[in-house]
Amino acid sequence: YQRRVRGEEERKEEKKEEKKKNYKKDCTTIAPVYQVTCKLCDQNYVGETCRTAHERLSEHYSYASNPTAKSYQGEALALHYRIFHSGCVPKLWFKILANESNTLTRKVLEALYIHQLQPEINNKDECKELTRFLI
């Protein structure tokens, strides 16, 4: 009985370690295309960066945390939190959709995901900028 219990505990510990590895891998992913979901209303944002996911997603969290800051006025998540969730603590969920080191390919992937997922938080200026970049 003790062996079986110990074996189950070891498997649980291995699963925890595997989750930590996967989490770290996602946070340190370089050049991701990603989705941000506001868990207060389930609206989405799709973006891309040449930096790590952690760096870029930390910025998005800052925009949502301080949506009235003058330097964040044009940021999509700041606008979203200013209009829909003023005074609320941000509840954001992040998902890596893809990662691609080639800038042009990454921007094309972002445009495809925006077209496919129709994220509500992305602003129209970003979509126009993507179109100009791609044409």
Image (tube, rainbow, N blue to C red):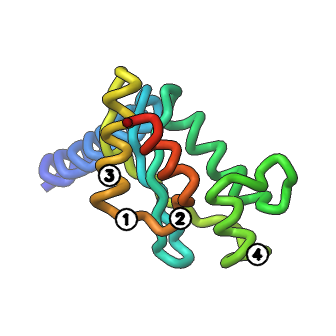
Which residue is label 3 attached to? 113
Q: Is residue 93 something that shows in the picture?
A: yes
Mark 4 and mark 3 residues within 8 Å of each other at the beta carbon: no
**Distance Cα–Cα, label 2 vs label 3:** 13 Å
User: In the shown orientation, is residue 106 left or right of residue 52?
Assistant: left
Q: Secondary structure at mark 3?
A: helix
Give how far apart the Cα atoms at labels 2 and 1 are.
9 Å
At label 2, the amino acid type is: Ile
Q: Nearer the viewer, mark 2 or mark 4?
A: 2
Identify the mark nearer the N-term, 2 or 3.
3
Query: CB under 8 Å between callouts 2 and 3?
Result: no
Decide which of tag 2 and tag 4 comes sooner along the chain. 4
- The residue depicted at 85 percent of the width and 55 percent of the height is 69
Residue matched to label 1: 118
**Label 4 to label 1, Cα distance in Å?**
24 Å
Of the numbered discs in the image, which one, if any, rests on residue 121? 2
